[in-house]
Image (tube, grey):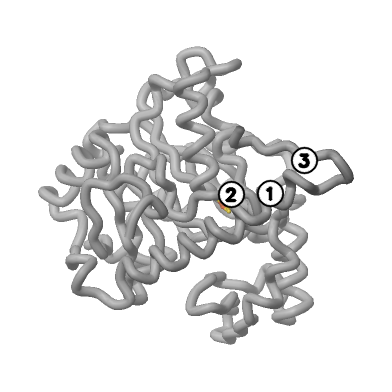
Amino acid sequence: MGAELGNYKSCVSARSTDKEILKHAQDGGIVSQLFGFALDEGIIDGAIVAANKEFAAKYPSKVMADNSNFDMIEPWRPIPAIVNTRAELIAAAGTKYNVSPNVSMIKEATRSFGLDKVGIVGTPCQMQAIRKLQLYPVGARDVGASIALAVGIFCMENFPYQSILQLVEDHAAMKMESVKKMEIGKGKFWVYGKRGQVVQLPLKVTHKYEQPGCKVCLDYVANLGDISTGSVGSPDGWSTVMVRSKIGDSVWAKAMAAGCFETQPIEKVKPGLELVSKLANEKISKNKATLEARATFGVGKALRNPYI
Ligand code: SF4
């Protein structure tokens, strides 16, 4: 296992020890627990997360959406929001499989929301945006220094909202508003209904709905997060956690000492890092091939390569 997993100081399989968080979490409740702890300890004074319509209706001052008409927001459309309490964190928990522009809120977080120490969760590309903003702060004066904890989520691909709508309503024959949870795992796209129904779609059905921009993405495990986490590698209800930066290491150690997490050595769990590594390599080599193809896309012309 090598560069495909990025640099990290430690890696474990973990889950939150908070029952309430676990009840609402996608997997092991890592993000909610970490941000909850960091809020309690004053490590951050707010976090940018992907919330939804119900959250926006309940906490209208925490979102940037036009708060006059929440009825217009579709179910399962993620809405970036600032959370300052555990209750808000829990209300925003769970993966939404379509694009949530969390980074769009970063400047506002330090301006009208007045945060000095911002937590942010996001996909690998969003971790890249944050690091780029810290090093090349074009149009984002003083924002970079306010980012106190960046938590990255493993990501194979994402979907536009319209794609998720079609997958759920046409392929899985379920209404968006009756869906309790969505999940990609074990080679399938799972849709869980509020009445207990479960539909699984093979991933070959979902491929054509992926966001085209994801096809040139070379990061699976959020290499640039302070901490990154995802379900792959760990048993159901647990998450794989990679502690990467000095900040991540210090927050993780404090959270562990405070009893926030139950952990198992990653070497002891199945399928473990081997699967994470395999999927990371698959993503990287497939997308490198796309990048190469872009170089000879036209007759005597190339499509732009953002990495060079
Ligand atoms: S695949 Fe890459 S570009 Fe697409 S959402 Fe995930 S991290 Fe971002």
In the picture, measured across the screen, residue 95 lies left or right of residue 273, that is: right
Q: Which residue is mark 1?
A: 213
Q: Is residue 125 above or below residue 164?
A: above
- Asked whether the beta carbons under mark 3 and mark 1 sit within 8 Å of each other, the answer is no
- Asked whether the beta carbons under mark 2 and mark 1 sit within 8 Å of each other, the answer is yes
CA separation, marks 2 and 3? 15 Å
Q: Which residue is mark 2?
A: 217
CA separation, marks 2 and 1? 7 Å
Q: Which numbered mark, 2 or 3, is in the foreground of this view? A: 3
Q: Is residue 39 above or below residue 166?
A: above
Q: Is mark 2 within 8 Å of ligand 1?
A: yes
Residue sitting at x 59%, y 54%: 54
In the picture, measured across the screen, residue 12 lies left or right of residue 258, that is: right
In the picture, measured across the screen, residue 190 lies left or right of residue 227, that is: right
> Amino acid type of disc 3?
Leu
**Where does residue 209 sit, x and y in percent of width and height?**
73, 64
Residue sitting at x 30%, y 71%: 272
Instruction: Pick the residue in front: 149 or 174.
Output: 149
- Earlier residue among tags 3 and 1: 1
Q: Residues within 10 Å of mark 2 (few under 14, many from 20)?
A: many
CA separation, marks 3 and 1? 13 Å
Q: Is mark 1 within 8 Å of ligand 1?
A: yes
> Amino acid type of disc 1?
Gly
Report whether residue 186 is seen: yes
Q: Which residue is mark 3?
A: 303
